[in-house]
């Protein structure tokens, strides 16, 4: 079976996380949404078996990031039958996707919306970036549709809220529980030891505590857990990540090559990001190459325990939840002592400086926060130079495809920035429904 991962128009509801990556590259549990789809349908890696249709401006950089997937290639789509899966859909537990290719073309629905389609090459070749919704709509008029269950990821806080459950499910499916005598000698284990999986190459220093009472813990290849760190399950620590005297609470996923200290609760750190020092991060999703300066902390609960609203493209969206932290785009930096409000959204390549008070909840991409207000950011050349320096320290290159991506995003997000700057000029700042109701 061949699998083609696609994005519908609803990926905009997952910004700022989806500004710089396809939706199926977002993390949920210990793996990406795309990995979960491939696993559900039993499709292995390789360009012969996996393809993708993504937004056009993402295609060049996605080919560099994932050379094992064929991207936006009509010839590949036309070669024969293919399973087309919506990257926002998560298959239900026990779903047997290997049998979907038996028989004629059909569409699988989740809550009445198309989750995937099994089609021949003649139908698949009609897939185009930006036209996925219309493609599914046309097929639904003439193909059999069956409800298959599962769930949709519609907003950034959906990933955070569902992360604990998927950490447990992924451990049962993907992990190899066990640890070496070397790890047993240096770490203290509270709870069942069969809920702990530590890669043999990981370094675990003395005075480290793993608490599996409430869920499993996975420590990846090359990770380094330093003394006086406590890790509580369910949790996944990615390869080459380092924990510095950290308090990692349950429901947390830390991607590859991060540097994490302080307290982290029920959060996802995508990868290559730093929270080296003290400070609290809770119910948050942090993108790649983010640096959270010392004592940077976020609120994840209003002091009246009310529903949290989060700005998406500047407009407040009700979350239906009381525990919501912050969502931070790639290559953003915060300064020493930055205090982030409940339900904060920060775009890509932002520079956030502290002001001694809670900072704005909406910070558009390529902006700065100066003296507590949103302001124009640094010049692109300066931002790119910083990105090159940051990535080179981890042995990575800020490639031309990456630069072009951010040039495209700078133009795409221009109106959002102008709108935010106008609010500051009008001295209106952030206006949230809950505040307006109290006046």
Image (spheres, helix red, strand yellow):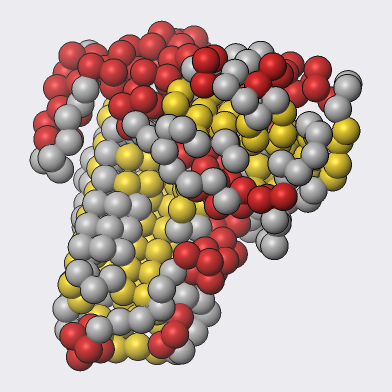
Q: Quadrant of residue 226?
A: bottom left
Q: Report the residue at 24% width, 51% height from top.
A: 257
Which quadrant is the C terminus positioned in? top right
Query: Looking at the image, is 151 positioned above or below residue 167?
Result: above
State which quarter of the image contains the N terminus.
top right
Q: Nearer the viewer, residue 354 or 23?
A: 23
Would you say 169 lies left or right of 276 here?
right
Q: Is residue 405 left or right of residue 6?
A: left
- Residue 11 x, y percent position in the rendering: 59, 29
Q: Position of residue 244 (x, y in %)?
A: 20, 66
Q: Quadrant of residue 406?
A: top left
Left or right for 393, reference 273: left
Q: Position of residue 163 (x, y in %)?
A: 54, 58
List x then y, in percent, for residue 88: 62, 38
Q: Residue at x 26, y 63 (%)?
A: 221
Task: Name the residue at 52% across, 79% down.
Answer: 214
Q: Is residue 219 above or below residue 391?
A: below
Which of 359 and 191 lies nearest the eye of the viewer? 191
* Residue 312 in view here: no
- In the image, 276 versus 204, the foreground residue is 204
Q: Residue at x 70, y 56 (%)?
A: 95
Q: How many marks?
A: 0
Image height of 33 relative to 277, above or below: above
Whether residue 27 appears in this view of the structure is: yes
Q: Is residue 322 above or below residue 70?
A: below
Looking at the picture, tell me which residue is in the foreground, 38 or 61: 38
């Amino acid at each position: 079976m061949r699998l083609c991962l696609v994005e519908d128009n609803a990926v905009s509801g997952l910004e700022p996380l989806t500004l710089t990556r396809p939706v199926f590259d977002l993390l949920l549990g210990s793996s990406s949404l795309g990995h979960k789809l491939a696993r559900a349908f039993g499709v292995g890696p390789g360009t012969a078996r996996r393809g993708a249709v993504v937004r056009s401006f993402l295609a060049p950089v996605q080919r560099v990031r994932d050379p094992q997937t064929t991207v936006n290639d009509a010839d590949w789509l036309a070669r024969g039958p293919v399973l087309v899966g919506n990257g926002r859909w998560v298959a239900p537990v026990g779903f047997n996707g290997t049998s979907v290719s038996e028989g004629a073309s059909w569409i699988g629905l989740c809550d009445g919306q198309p989750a995937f389609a099994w089609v021949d090459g003649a139908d698949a070749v009609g897939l185009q970036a930006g036209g996925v919704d219309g493609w599914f709509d046309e097929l639904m008029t003439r193909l059999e549709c069956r409800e298959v269950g599962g769930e949709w990821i519609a907003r950034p806080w959906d990933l955070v809220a569902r992360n604990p459950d998927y950490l447990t499910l992924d451990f049962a499916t993907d992990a190899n529980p066990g640890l070496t005598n070397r790890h047993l000698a240096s770490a203290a284990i509270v709870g069942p030891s069969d809920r702990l999986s530590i890669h043999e190459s990981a370094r675990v220093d003395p005075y480290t505590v793993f608490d599996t009472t409430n869920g499993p813990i996975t420590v990846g290849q090359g990770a380094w857990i330093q003394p006086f760190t406590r890790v509580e399950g369910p949790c996944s620590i990615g390869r080459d990540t380092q924990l510095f005297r950290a308090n990692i609470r349950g429901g947390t996923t830390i991607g590859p090559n991060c540097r994490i200290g302080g307290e982290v609760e029920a959060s996802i750190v995508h990868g290559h990001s730093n929270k080296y020092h003290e400070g609290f991060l809770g119910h948050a999703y942090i993108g790649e190459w983010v640096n959270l300066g010392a004592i940077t902390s976020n609120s994840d609960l209003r002091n009246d325990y009310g529903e949290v609203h989060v700005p998406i493209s500047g407009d407040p969206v009700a979350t239906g939840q009381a525990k919501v932290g912050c969502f931070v785009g790639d290559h953003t930096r915060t300064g020493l002592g930055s205090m982030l409000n409940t339900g904060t959204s920060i775009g890509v390549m932002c520079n956030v400086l502290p002001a001694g008070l809670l900072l704005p909840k909406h910070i558009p991409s390529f902006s700065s926060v100066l003296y507590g207000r949103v302001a124009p950011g640094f010049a692109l050349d300066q931002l790119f130079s910083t990105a090159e320096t940051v990535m080179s320290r981890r042995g990575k290159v800020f490639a031309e495809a990456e630069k072009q991506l951010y040039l495209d995003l700078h133009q795409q997000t221009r109106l959002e920035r102008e709108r935010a700057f106008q609010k500051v000029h009008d001295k209106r700042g952030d206006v949230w429904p809950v505040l307006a109701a109290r006046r």
